[in-house]
Amino acid sequence: MTVSMRVMSAGDGYKYLLRTVAAGDGDRSLSTPLTRYYAEEGSPPGRWLGAGVAALGGAIQVGDQVSESQLQLLVGMGRNPATGDPLGLAYPAYRTVVERVEKRTTALDPAIGPASRAEAVARIEAEEAARGTRRAVAGYDFTFSIPKSASVLWAVADAGTQALIADAHHVAVAEVVAFMEREVAATRTGATARDGAVAQVDVRGLIATAFDHYDSRAGDPHLHTHVVISNKVQTVLDGKWRSLDGRPLHAATVALSELHEAVFADHLTRMFGAEWEARDMGRDRNLAWAVASVPEELVVEFSSRSRHIDAEKNRLITEYVEKHGRQPSMATIIKLRAQATLTTRPEKQVRSLADLTAEWRDRASRLLGTDATSWARGVTANDAPMLLRADDIPLEVIASLGQSVVDVVGEKRSTWRRWNLTAEAARQTMGYRFASTVDREAIVGLVVDAAEAASLRLTPPELAKSPAVFQRADGTSVFRPKHSTVFSSELLLAAEDRLLERANTTTGPTVPLATVERIAAKPDRDGRVLGPDQASALAKVALSGRVVDVLVGPAGAGKTTAMSALRRAWEHEHGRGSVVGLAPSAVAAQVLADDLGIATENTAKWWEVHERTGATFRKDQLVIVDEASLAGTLSLDRITNLAAEAGAKVLLVGDHAQLQSVTAGGAFSLLVHDRDDAAELVTLHRFANAWEKTASLGLRHGHTDVIDTYAEHDRIQGGETDAMIDAAYTAWRTDTLASQASVLVTDSNESVLALNNRARADLILDGTVDARREVELRDGTYAAAGDTVITRRNDRRLRAGRGWVRNGDRWTITEVRDDGSLTLRRAGRKWGASVVLPAGYAAEDLDLG
């Protein structure tokens, strides 16, 4: 994405923006902020942006430099950055450290002695101080990045061309912010949100500050701008200062990203005649648009940390030779490289654009085999481009694009709103180059209108017209949020209707009550006896006769135990093999097979086999679809239709409050909420602490106040990104060394890559991984014997005992062969079946785990 967004807290959350700002002379008369601070260490000072700046009283103008004191007033305190006057109500105060300390000390056992009590209080105070204080939302940090190929071109071009590319970037950012002011920004007024009577009204623009940054943490060219939008906005309706409505900001981020990329591409084409092309970025990655004349090899050169690691490794080798008087052995070199991996994660260096540019030009020149600046001059010297006006696009093309947008969105979502359509419309029109942003916005808007017309509107129209005072400039009612109409398609609704009909049809196979009661009363082979909710769920499913049935349960509620009892009861009545399993993924299908001892398959593969061979279900069979919330609606429609025709029963098992399908889904939740007697497991068995059981269910139901419960039990730590990554990694490493299962989750592929490299370096240094023979994986990382890896493609030809290689399986490498193939054993097992992975699979479809 070229635009990302994160929420900023009140207080000192703004200070990270100032850490790299250059301390140069802001009065220099050169052309742009980037050139003005070309020789200074650090980034240019921020500048004011947005139409809302005019509401601050005239002391600050758009384009003026931002001072730290102004940021502190606006973002830190919610006050006018020019006068210090309050902008509406103060930020809400949440429970402070002092209040939390008082609550915990009050709960101490009164019988403990004074010394023990003082020690306990000191410990509580230290723990609460480390956790900090929850703060109100002060703003939204939108990061606008230009495509990597354009950043590379900017990095090596001469100073004048650099300034022009930066100008194109700045204009694109300003135009998208202006679009946000027209289409996204709003505030709420009236009654509280709880009773649904809030009016969403327009605001007098946004107050924003824009901070340019040159490079990534690794020192690669990465021209991007942090646009911090204040949460304080002035209401058009009555002139009062209120808070931004954050919901549309979140909803529109993807659409803004797609629009920004296209707008910037237009500017670069108008300026230099640059041509753009879509590049395949490999498995699980979206197509990336790039300047056609910038080779992918050059983009890759500036997208990797490996060169930093190699440089540090070479320095360590030189240091070793000077100390020992000899070259290190291969085993020592491997450890030195692992050490380099761990030590090349420093704080981001603050350097001048002049120094960075010199380094970038040198590296690019070596790769290109010619002077990089001269090469960039040729790339930017093109004939005048052919540009489109809005009226150049025929109406039939717009209608066709609108239908295409609906088709693509409808494959991924069961319902959608205008922002979903806008993102896809911007994506599908990215190949066009327009003469102005007005033309692009017009065409994207027309395509979205056509897509809405091709969709099925679910939101009913307004039954009464609002008085003029409660209407926006476009005539819409302030009591209905902008762009909130929900759409779907007749195809999906028809599939949902068929599923509902089958769920209410009671002619399916059953199991007698006597059999159910006998099975429910007997322990299973592990000595487990069904709890009351499990026994009730078993009876509901076995006796209902519903052709399509549901079993609901949160994680840890014992769904597997209940399904195992159901399998025994069903097979007692209908014979061995009368229970089969399906799941949306191959890994989930294998887990179901292992847990229940039944034949299973993933839904996509089962359907492919059915279409190819005609294989289907048989009469009185029970088809268990596990992780049903992840199954797409159309897939469930097809499967349940075949089951109904065969006289079988389908049981959908899952939790509608957890993850949903990556395709058009929601059918499981629909079926659960269509009835008031769905079989549901409510007792959690996974947690040792009673409070955690309650809190887990609270989170499941969306009760945000439960977050305070987790905070009170020290389950939440907050801080800046790097500090939190370090803390999470340290905790994971501690668990791993203690032989405890631990999961480390992060928010980006880049972080996953860095954490994998860091973990691997530690494992090499402690001898767990033998890196004397390695293979390179597709993302530039390496793997060797002892590494944990994840396979990313199903391949039934690669057998491991009775199983096979599945997407998402975790393995341990036991041998790296001379030809690049690998011997793997399933992770967590010291013995068992192995599989030999071909070199090609390892290079393209294997990740560190």
Image (cartoon, rainbow, N blue to C red):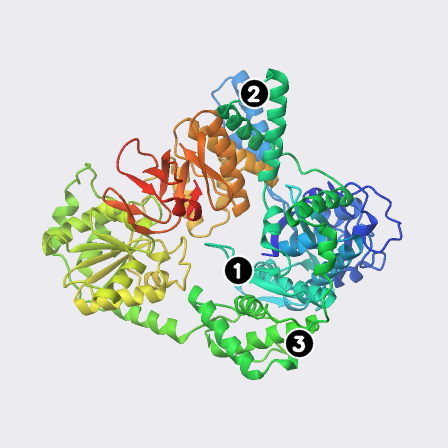
Give the residue at x 61% y 59%. Answer: 290
Q: Which mark is residue 388?
A: 3
Q: CA distance from mark 1 to mark 3?
A: 23 Å
Chain-order first, disc 1 or disc 3: 1
The quadrant of the picture occupied by the N terminus is bottom right
- Name the residue nearer the viewer: 365 or 507: 365
**Amino acid type at image mark 1:** Leu
Which residue carries the number 1 mark? 287
Q: Position of residue 363 (x, y in %)?
A: 67, 44
Residue 508, compared with residue 318, is above or below; it is below
Q: Which mark is residue 197?
A: none
- Point out the residue furthest to the bottom here: 395
**Amino acid type at image mark 3:** Leu
Q: Which mark is residue 118?
A: 2
Residue 70, compared with residue 690, is above or below; it is below
Give the structural element (helix, strand or loop) at label 3: loop
Task: Locate residue 595: give its quadrant.
Answer: top left
**Amino acid type at image mark 2:** Ala
Q: Position of residue 477 (x, y in %)?
A: 60, 74
Select label 3 or label 2 by which is in front: 3
Chain-order first, disc 3 or disc 2: 2
